[in-house]
Structure formats: structure tokens, C-alpha cells
Amino acid sequence: MPGSGSRPRRGFGFTLIEVLVALAIIAIALMAALRAAGMGMDNVSALRLRLFAGWVAENVLAEQRAREEWLPPGTYDGSARQGGISFTWREKVSETPNIAFRRVDIHVYASGETHAVARLTGFLTQPPGMVR
């Protein structure tokens, strides 16, 4: 039985300040997690763009090989769509020490970009029966 001089019994639980500190820590942790997730989404879209640009470069070289094109040395431009995205490509065809091969450097740009999103270097062989 409590007497007149006894202290009131303190309840179990947290004080208001302890709850506010805990909420602040949780809020900071959640903001960091959201930022990391946002950066991950940005990386996914950049990787998707690079993947499609790489496919464009591979398609340009594969078409030339399939058609057995023997392009003269020089620079050529073109455009393509891949995955709903428009790309432009530029290829530089140059001679090699072996006259039966041509080096092809392909650079692929996304619409409005000034730097290449993908680069590919390949070689074309002189079609059979073509005399140089």
C-alpha cells in the first residue's frame, strides 16, 4: 500500500524523446534505402541502353558479312531502332596489312547523344571470287 511519502511507480515503455530519436533513425535509414533503389533503377536503364546499342553494332557488322559487302575504306552512317529506341551509327572502314581483310570500327549513339553508347571492332573478309 503506497504511503504518502512514496514515489509513484514508473511505467514500462519509452519516453517521448526515445521514440522521436528512434523515428529519426528509421527515417534516415529509409531515405538511404530509397536513394540506393533509385540509383539502381538509373543503372538498369543505362545498361538497357548499352545492351540495345551493342545489338545495333553487332547487327550492322552481321548484315555486312551476310551480304558479303566489300566496302571501300571510308566512313559510313546509318540509323536503326532496337527495343523501341532510335540509334544512329557510324562506321569507319579501313584497310589492314592483309589485303583480304578490312577493319570495321562501329560507334553507336543514342538519339541526341554526343558520345558513343557502344563500340564494336570487327573484320570483313574479301568475298570469294573478287579479285583485287
Image (spheres, rainbow, N blue to C red):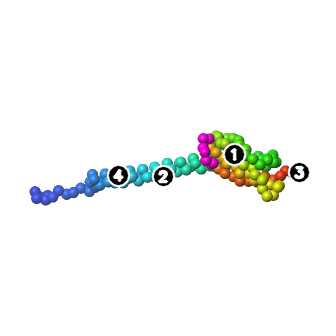
Looking at the image, do the residues carrying marks 2 and 3 touch, with CB atoms under 8 Å apart?
no
Q: Quadrant of the N terminus?
A: bottom left
Instruction: Give the residue at mark 1.
Output: 90
Out of 27 and 35, give the one closest to the viewer: 35
Looking at the image, do the residues carrying marks 4 and 2 touch, with CB atoms under 8 Å apart?
no
- State which mark lies toward you, 4 or 1: 1
- What residue is at 63 percent from the left and 48 percent from the top? 116
Instruction: Give the residue at mark 2.
Output: 36
Return the x and y of residue 86 as percentages of the image width and height. Answer: 64, 40
Instruction: Give the residue at mark 4.
Output: 24
- State which mark lies toward you, 2 or 3: 3
Disc 1 residue type? Arg
SS label for mark 1:
strand
Label located before the other in sequence (2 or 3): 2
Out of 28 and 110, give the one closest to the viewer: 110
Label located before the other in sequence (4 or 2): 4
Q: Is residue 24 left or right of residue 9?
A: right
Instruction: Give the residue at mark 3.
Output: 131
Q: Quadrant of residue 5?
A: bottom left
Out of 64 and 46, give the one closest to the viewer: 64
Q: Specify the segment rendered in magenta.
A: 111-117
What is the spatial separation of the Cα atoms under label 4 and label 3, in whole angstroms?
78 Å
